[in-house]
Image: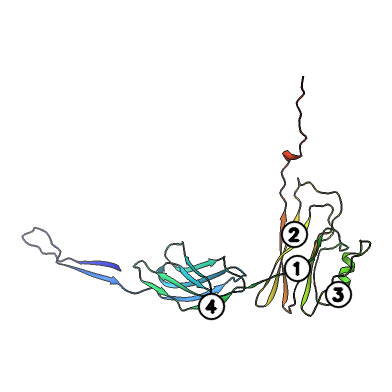
Amino acid sequence: MKTIYLALVVFLLISGTGCSPSTIIQSTDPTPPVISDVLVSDITESSVTITWTTDEPATSNAEFRSKTTVYIVEGSSPLDTSHSITLDTLRSDTTFSYKVISQDASNNESESDDYAFTTFKELAFETIEKGYVSGFRERSFRVVTNNSDWQNLWDIVNSIRTPQPPLPEIDFTETMIIAVFQGCKPTGGYSIEITKVVETESALEVYVEETSPGPWCVVTCALSEPHHIIKIPKSDKEFIFEVEQKVLTCPLYRDDLLPEIVPLVK
């Protein structure tokens, strides 16, 4: 417990010899911090952030529970009145209950009520085609939900191929197509890939990674049209494309590409 000593000193002037303390009163702090404004934010398929406030400086701890797992998170920051904890190792499409815990300098501890949230679902997908030769000359992201549009898309993709490969069968009552095209590039070394699809409460977030070669990268001297076509479960939600641009870093030279030097034998 937090202890405060108040010294009440009574000065007794006795024969001019000075003073002596007459009473020492001990006071304690038995009151735990008051927790308020508990909020959940930034939910993804694997992470979440919890924030809250206390009426006095206190620690920042939290407990997360699913049906199979318990996470205890201890904040590393000093005592504070504004608290935030982020947990980034959660299971996709899982409901967690949680509560926050704060302890003041006198070891008085408070716990919040139990709350709950559900992480977003990362959808499994099947790659229909991924390559570097395509009839699409412009950068484009497409969502296809019927056979007619699928046939048109497939015809454009394969317009420069002879013979044209057969149209893959897609059951649009159960599934749909997402296709991303990087456009016509002057050389090789470019690529585009759908890395994941995450279902949120209101949308499907499609994560796309686009790569281009750095100045010292060895590439083929030929036009390329990188593309990636996938199949996912059917959804009526809005599509949001989250694009990450990357540039390959290549060394100025590579030892394994240098010619072998054979010493002359006299």
Whichever of labels 3 and 2 marks the residue nearer the N terminus, that label is 3
| Upstream in sequence: badge 1 or badge 4 | 4
Measured in 3D between alpha carbons, the distance from the residue under mark 3 to the one under mark 2, in whole angstroms, is 25 Å
Q: What residue does disc 4 label?
A: 116
* Nearer-N-terminus badge (1/2): 1
Which numbered disc covers residue 210? 2
Q: Which residue is mark 3?
A: 149
Q: Which mark is nearer the camera, 4 or 2?
A: 4
User: Can you say which quadrant of the picture contains the C terminus?
Assistant: top right
Q: How many C-alpha atoms fall within 10 Å of the one at disc 1: few (<14), some, or many (≥20)? A: few
As measured in the structure, the alpha-carbon distance from the residue carrying label 4 to the one carrying label 2 is 36 Å
Where residue 25 sits: x, y (%)? 21, 69
* Label 1 close to label 4 by CB (< 8 Å): no
User: Residue 198 lies in what quarter of the image?
Assistant: bottom right
SS of the residue under disc 3: helix
In which quarter of the view is residue 149 placed? bottom right
Q: Residue at x 60, y 73 (%)?
A: 119
Q: Secondary structure at mark 2?
A: strand
Q: Residue at x 75, y 56 (%)?
A: 211
The residue type indicated by label 4 comes to: Ala
Viewer-proximal residue among 97 and 263: 263
> Which kind of residue does numbered mark 1 sit on?
Glu
Judge left or right: residue 82 versus residue 160: left
Mark 3 or mark 4: name the one nearer the start of the chain: 4
Mark 3 or mark 1: which comes first in sequence? 1
Query: Looking at numbered disc 3 in the image, what kind of residue is underneath it?
Result: Asp
Q: Nearer the viewer, residue 38 or 166?
A: 166
Disc 4 secondary structure class: strand
In percent of width and height, residue 226 lies at 81, 59
